[in-house]
Amino acid sequence: MRDYSNKADVLLGLQWGDEGKGKVVDILAERYDMASRFQGGPNAGHTLEFDGKKFVLHTIPSGIFRPQVLNLVGNGVVIDPAIFKQEIEELVAAGVDPLRNLFISKKAHLILPSHRALDAASEASKGKTKIGSTLKGIGPAYMDKTGRNGLRVGDILAPNFAERYQALLEKHQWLLRQYDFAYDIRDYQARWFEGIELLRQARVVDSENLVNQMLDQGKTVLAEGAQGTLLDIDFGTFPYVTSSNTISAGACTGLGVPPNRIGKVFGVFKAYTTRVGSGPFPTELFDDDGARIRRVGREVGATTGRDRRCGWLDLPALKYAVMVNGVTDLVMTKADVLSGFAQVKVAVEYHDGPDRLDNLPYDMNNTTALPVYRSFEPWSGDLGGLRRVEDFPAALRSYIDFIEQELQVPIRVVSLGPDRSQIVFT
Ligand code: IMP
């Protein structure tokens, strides 16, 4: 009989991305034999800080700084070779040998330079209703995947790759003419082909076999989500979402790991909420509290440099995220940012007029429902040096207890600053 008892754990974001997943994976990766990415692409920016240095990873899993950990870019990811090359070069400059422990799925799709142009053309044509895309070509690349036109990493090894690239480029050029959009991809294309050369030297594999073999051998595997649950193509705030399944089920399709081989699901959330790009955000703050969260929390996009929108924690949204992901372990980040506030609020319910909603509104973009808040006693002081829950201010402990009770899932990890060392296991 086959033995499926050894399972892969998943770590993902429960909000609109930027929950601090990169740091948490970097720390947890120490306990795993493999760290893998299963969806998204260079729209992600996973920030890691240690030894006074800061790194932002876009394509490469956050286990890359741990020499004993294998890193896998799964089939569900879309890869831009130019950005991949830049990332590799930055890691090499930092003294890491990234290609040694890095595997890339043959079935991962490529983002072409013309996908970036299509992304920009599509956004420009939408005017006020633009998604606020990172303009990395993510949406058009996934469209070519589901439209069955796309090129995959494994195709770069075929002798006719250049012709296939040219054929897809011509399709894109035709589409771009419909938009009447000015673009010039020549410089980028040159760098892109340099990236293709580098990818040819990398370990391009049938990754679904590799990851299942690892599990068969009793090895530990961590799947690292990008973006967040509320940006999921099916369950997020559509159409203001990304183009992939960011939820735990995405780890199955994005790696080839069957559902009965998913173990723990770590759900990462900030003690407040942020969002970058357009779309609904019911608990958004437009006052001094919002500005203070942005300033103290350094809430600026790691990939785009855009200011993030900031607001209070949205518990109904978090409950929804826990449900669709099957979260078993919660990770709370950035409670230190809320230290010293005059008040801390949490949206605990949605009401439509006198009616309390049992579920999140179907279309958060067009709803008259509003969040109802509960105020919490604030906490104060510098929390960055705390290493034990017993030392947390009582008000923060109450905040944690309340969230755990509401979500019925334990908060196992609390992160209290950007550095690797600023972490507390409860
Ligand atoms: P796209 O994924 O670049 O198409 O962008 C779609 C939406 O998802 C936009 O609102 C982006 O700001 C948002 N988004 C994409 N990737 C991330 C991320 O890694 N963190 C936060 N927001 C993201």
Image (cartoon, rainbow, N blue to C red):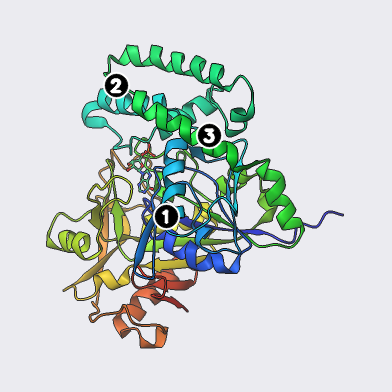
SS for dot 2: loop
- Estimate the spatial distance between the alpha carbons at disc 2 and disc 1, rounded to whole Å: 32 Å
Residue 231 disc label: none
At horizontal 74% and vertical 63% (from top left) the residue drawn is 218
- Estimate the spatial distance between the alpha carbons at disc 3 and disc 1, rounded to whole Å: 19 Å
- Residue 279 occupies which quadrant of the picture? top left
| Left or right side of 242 for 378 | left
Task: Look at discs 2 and 3 and give the one toward the viewer.
Answer: 3
Q: Quadrant of ligand 1?
A: top left
SS for dot 1: helix
- Residue 269 occupies which quadrant of the picture? bottom left
At horizontal 45% and vertical 18% (from top left) the residue drawn is 169
Residue hosting label 1: 93
- Residue 376 occupies which quadrant of the picture? bottom left
Q: Are marks 2 and 1 in contact (CB under 8 Å)?
A: no
Residue 183 disc label: 2
Residue 357 percent location from the top left of the image: 36, 52
Task: Look at discs 2 and 1 and give the one toward the viewer.
Answer: 1
SS for dot 3: helix
As drawn, 239 above or below 39: above
At horizontal 25% and vertical 26% (from top left) the residue drawn is 124
- Residue type for callout 3: Glu
Tell me which numbered mark, 2 or 3, is placed earlier along the sequence.
2
Tell me which numbered mark, 3 or 1, is placed earlier along the sequence.
1
Residue 197 disc label: 3
The quarter of the picture where the N terminus appears is bottom right
- Residue type for callout 1: Ala
Residue 168 percent location from the top left of the image: 49, 18
Tell me which numbered mark, 2 or 1, is placed earlier along the sequence.
1
